[in-house]
Image (cartoon, rainbow, N blue to C red):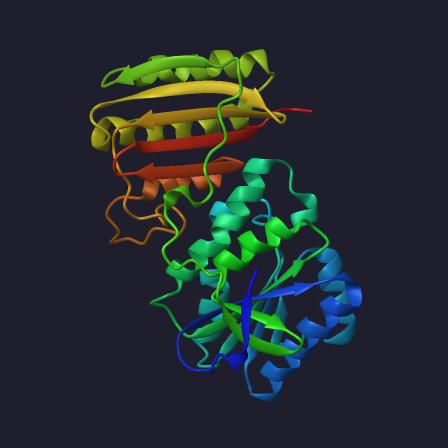
Amino acid sequence: MTTSRSTPVPSGDGYRHELYPYRGRDEFLEGTVGFIREALDGGEAVVVAVPEDKAFLLRAEIPDDGAVRYVDTTSVAHHPGRLIGAWQEWIKEHAEQGRPVRGIGESPWNEVRCRAEQEELRYHEWLLNKAFAAGPAWWLLCPYDTDGESAALEQMARCHPEIRADGRTASSTDFDPQAPFDFAPLSHPCDPYDEFAYAGGDLPALREKIAACAELHGLGGRRLRELHLAATEVAANSIRHGGGQGVLRTWSQNQRLVCEFRDAGYIADPLVGRSRPDSTQVGGRGLWLAHQLCDLVEIRSLPDEGTTIRLHTELPG
């Protein structure tokens, strides 16, 4: 990973997205507390969205006093597809008050439950740049513990236009502004898996296939109904926009039931389904609903390969 430390990034309007690599408790506090105090000295508000153990450390230094707000990330921390919508709501509350806003956002990397979740969290970091490119001006600092592999840090640098080191902000030369949908490629399906080709009129049979697989793994009740609803939305999109047909694959992996949908369609917007639909929005509601109902949603789409969507639902026990 390389950075250009000799040329500080100038402040100004627009979204700023900065990576802060740190090692250990003291470096975490040094960078984040300094960032908050800079904001307060400039009359800015700060939204802090970090794991509870990190929030505990920060509250001991800087309490929640109105200008600094610690938000509960419990319902979104392990759901990357919900995080952009959450940040939009958190920032909107302060933007409406006319105050400049900074944020501190750290994902619970040490609590990641599977590789797919890790890749989606990293992909989310890159998508933040697109989500807020045309929105209100604000500055997001993303602390990242460097105790992990150096390759993982290089991947994070690809997602952030700026990087903080030695108390200074500089441009990250590793940032990839044109990362495609295959930025975080999907893993191969877990063998064995069941496969079912569907087209118009096959949605009841598709739900039966999913129910049969779920029953084998003890999934039922409300969680199965939610999965059925999300699966119906995704399959209906395949039929409507993906050439009139698709292929369902189901398997269990990492204590989750995975339903994969493949079709020949192409989704041009990598942010589809990640923001709460408004009353005037056309399309995208089904994928937003899938993000709310499932424990993890993976979406990959390329013009010459079609679209693959995976819905993950945690299994009992």
Q: Which residue is located at x 75 percent, y 57 percent?
A: 53
Image label count? 0
Which corner quadrant holds the C terminus?
top right
Residue 267, visible in the rendered structure: yes
Residue 58, visible in the rendered structure: no
Residue sitting nearer the eye, 97 or 306: 306
Residue 61 % position (x, y): 76, 75
Quarter location, residue 301: top left
Quarter location, residue 194: top left
Residue sitting nearer the eye, 124 or 314: 124
Residue 133 % position (x, y): 36, 66
Which corner quadrant holds the N terminus?
bottom right
Q: Which residue is located at x 64 percent, y 77 percent?
A: 36
Residue sitting nearer the eye, 179 or 72: 179
Residue 308 vertical placement versus 42 (above, below): above
Residue 114 % position (x, y): 62, 35
Left or right, 255 with respect to 25, comes to left
Q: Which residue is located at x 47 percent, y 66 percent?
A: 161
Q: Which residue is located at x 46 percent, y 82 percent?
A: 10
Residue 165 % position (x, y): 63, 72
